[in-house]
Image: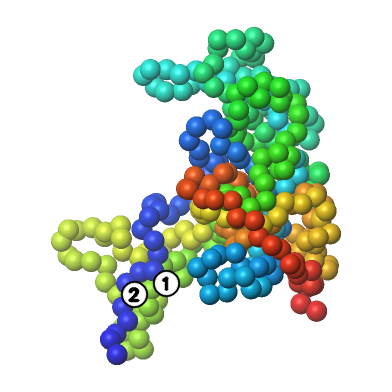
C-alpha cells in the first residue's frame, strides 16, 4: 500500500485566516435588484422528501436527509441610501433619508445630509434594514443594521415599512448563504489544517509540521501549516435549496425546542443541508449567483422529536 501523505488539509483559497470584523456578515452582490434577506440560525433536524433528481439512483423514492431552520421575522426598512455614479471613483453616497430611530435600535446612527426631493440626485438606491429580535426567540438587546439592494422604484415607497421573507423568496428557489463560522480561537496546526501527528520516535514535538521549508529563502513560506486563528471567518456557501417557507412554527419546533436556541416564534425558512455559523448567529441569504433552476421538493416528514437527549 502506498504511504498516505497529507502535508496540509486546509484550503489556500482564503488568506489571511483572521477573525471577521463583526459577528454578522455583509453581503456582496452585483447589480441593484438581487433579493437579499436575513434570519437567525435556530438549529438542524432531519426530513423525508421524494428524491427529484432524475439521474439519482433513488429518483422517485422517499429519502431522509438533514435540513437547517432559520427564524426570519420581518426586516424593518429604516433608511434609504442614494448613490451617484462618478466617472473616476465609481459610486458614492449622495444622500440618505432615515425614519425616526426606534427605541429598540439602541444606537445613534451617523447619517448623510437628509434628502427630501428624490429627483435627479441618484443613479440607484439601496435600503438600510434593521432586524427585529423582539419578534423572534432571540434575547438580543441590540439589533443588526445592514444595507441590501432593492428595486429603485419600489424603494421610495418602502421607508418605514416591513419586508417579509415571503415577499423576497419562494419555495424551491436556490440561495447563497453567508455567515460567520464557529470560532475555535488560537489552535495548533493539527486541528487547524489536519496534518499528521508525528510518530513516537520523533524528537521533541509531535503535533507540528515536519518541515518548515528550506534554508533559502530565509523566511517561512505562507503555505506552511502553522498555528493561528481557527474559525470565526466570513464564509459563503452557494446553491442552498429552499425546501419550505412557513409561518406556523409548530411545523418545525421539536419537542422541548432547539438546544441553545429555544423555540421558533415567527416565520421560518427550511434549507436543504447544513450552513456555516453557530446557533443564534445571523445568516444572510441572497438569490443564487450561479445558474440554477427552481426545484420544489415534495416534503413528507419533518422530525419533531426531542433533541434534549432523553
Q: Nearest the camera: 214 or 247? A: 247
Q: Secondary structure at mark 2?
A: loop
Q: Which mark is first along the chain, 1 or 2?
A: 2
The CA distance from mark 2 to mark 1 is 8 Å
Query: Which quadrant of the structure image shows residue 27?
Result: top right
* Label ID, residue 59: none
Residue drawn at x 81%, y 44% as measured from the top left: 135
Q: Nearest the camera: 239 or 275? A: 239
Q: Nearest the camera: 168 or 20? A: 168
Residue 167, above or below 93: below
Residue 284, above or below 192: above
Query: Which quadrant of the structure image shows residue 52?
Result: bottom right
Q: Residue 81: percent from the left, percent from the top?
A: 60, 23
Whether residue 51 is visible here, answered yes or no, is yes
Do labels 2 and 1 touch, CB within 8 Å? Answer: yes
Residue drawn at x 38%, y 55% as measured from the top left: 13
Q: Residue 185: percent from the left, percent from the top?
A: 53, 60
Residue at the disc numbered 1: 194
Residue at the disc numbered 2: 6
Residue drawn at x 23%, y 58% as measured from the top left: 219
Amino acid at each position: 500500500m502506498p504511504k498516505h501523505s497529507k502535508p496540509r488539509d486546509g484550503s489556500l483559497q482564503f488568506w489571511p485566516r483572521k477573525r471577521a470584523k463583526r459577528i454578522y456578515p455583509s453581503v456582496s452582490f452585483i447589480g441593484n435588484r438581487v433579493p437579499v434577506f436575513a434570519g437567525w440560525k435556530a438549529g438542524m433536524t432531519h426530513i423525508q422528501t421524494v428524491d427529484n433528481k432524475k439521474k439519482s439512483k433513488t429518483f422517485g423514492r422517499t429519502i431522509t436527509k438533514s435540513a437547517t431552520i432559520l427564524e426570519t421575522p420581518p426586516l424593518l426598512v429604516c433608511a434609504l441610501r442614494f448613490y451617484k455614479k462618478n466617472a473616476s471613483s465609481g459610486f458614492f453616497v449622495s444622500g440618505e433619508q432615515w425614519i425616526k430611530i426606534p427605541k429598540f435600535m439602541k444606537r445613534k446612527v451617523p447619517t448623510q445630509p437628509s434628502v427630501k426631493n428624490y429627483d435627479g440626485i441618484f443613479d440607484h438606491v439601496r435600503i438600510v434594514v434593521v432586524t427585529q429580535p423582539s419578534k423572534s426567540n432571540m434575547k438580543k438587546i441590540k439589533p443588526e443594521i445592514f444595507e441590501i439592494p432593492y428595486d429603485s422604484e419600489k424603494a421610495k415607497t418602502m421607508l418605514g415599512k416591513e419586508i417579509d421573507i415571503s415577499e423576497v423568496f419562494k419555495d424551491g428557489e436556490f440561495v447563497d448563504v453567508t455567515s460567520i463560522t464557529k470560532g475555535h480561537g488560537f489552535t495548533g496546526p493539527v486541528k487547524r489544517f489536519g496534518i499528521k501527528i508525528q510518530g513516537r520516535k520523533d524528537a521533541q514535538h509531535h503535533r507540528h509540521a515536519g518541515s518548515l521549508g528550506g534554508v533559502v529563502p530565509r523566511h517561512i513560506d505562507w503555505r506552511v501549516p502553522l498555528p493561528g486563528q481557527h474559525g470565526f471567518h466570513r464564509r459563503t456557501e452557494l446553491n442552498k435549496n429552499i425546501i419550505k417557507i412557513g409561518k406556523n412554527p409548530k411545523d418545525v419546533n421539536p419537542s422541548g425546542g432547539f438546544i441553545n436556541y429555544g423555540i421558533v416564534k415567527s416565520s421560518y425558512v427550511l434549507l436543504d443541508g447544513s450552513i456555516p455559523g453557530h446557533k443564534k448567529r445571523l445568516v444572510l441569504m441572497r438569490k443564487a449567483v450561479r445558474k440554477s433552476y427552481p426545484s420544489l421538493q415534495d416534503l413528507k416528514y419533518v422530525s419533531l422529536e426531542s433533541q434534549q437527549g432523553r
